[in-house]
Amino acid sequence: MVLAFFFYLKLRKSEILVRSLQDKQQEFLQKLDFNARLEKEIVETFAKRQEELALLEEKLHQRTTEMRRLLEQAENFTKSPQFLRQTILSGFRRGQSAQALAQATGLSVDEVELILDQPKAGL
């Protein structure tokens, strides 16, 4: 009888231990499932961000190309003789000296005076 009671206690203790292990296993599986879903979400978000970055990089490249083209156009325009002439004439009308105009345009004073002495049709 004592042996049966002792066996019963051991069996009861084992059942409690098995139940506890099952609960912990179930808890562990739930955490694994949550982590797997979280990892999947992170990977999807990362992939989406990578796509967005690639699109932004392409747009940036297009804008860079466009800005270079516009800058080249502006540089060509500002180097044109007609633009220099207009700049010198409008500066002269505003009262700037030939020396100041020469400095601003990168021309010599003689070149500025030559432009100013051309027929005054532009004035």
Image: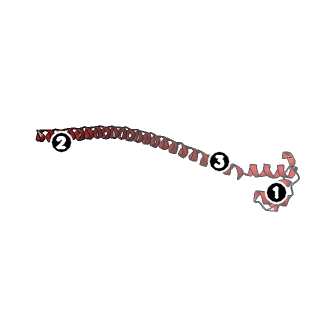
Question: Which amino acid type is shown beneath numbered disc 1?
Answer: Leu
* Numbered disc 2: secondary structure: helix
Disc 2 from disc 3: Cα separation: 93 Å
| Whether residue 64 is situated above or below residue 99 in the rendered picture | above
| Residue type, numbered disc 3 | Gln
Residue at the outermost right position: 95
On screen, residue 29 versus residue 49, left or right, reads left
Q: Say how many tags the image has.
A: 3
Asked if the residues shown at circle 2 and circle 1 are in contact, with their CB atoms under 8 angstroms apart, the answer is no
What residue does disc 2 label? 10
Q: Position of residue 31 (x, y in %)?
A: 34, 40
Check residue 73 in the rendering and tell me which mark sits there, or answer none.
3
**In this view of the protein, which residue sits in the foreground, 70 or 79?**
70
> Upstream in the sequence, badge 2 or badge 1?
2
Q: Camera-side residue: 81 or 5?
A: 5
Residue tagged by mark 1?
A: 101
Q: Position of residue 103 (x, y in %)?
A: 79, 60
Using the image as rendered, state which of residue 60 and residue 51 is in the foreground: 51
Left or right: residue 106 versus residue 30 is right
Could you classify mark 1 by the number of other residues whose Cα lies within 10 Å: few (under 14), some (14-19), or many (20 or more)?
Answer: many
Element under disc 3: helix
N-term-proximal mark, 2 vs 3: 2
* Residue nearest the observer in this picture, 50 or 19: 19
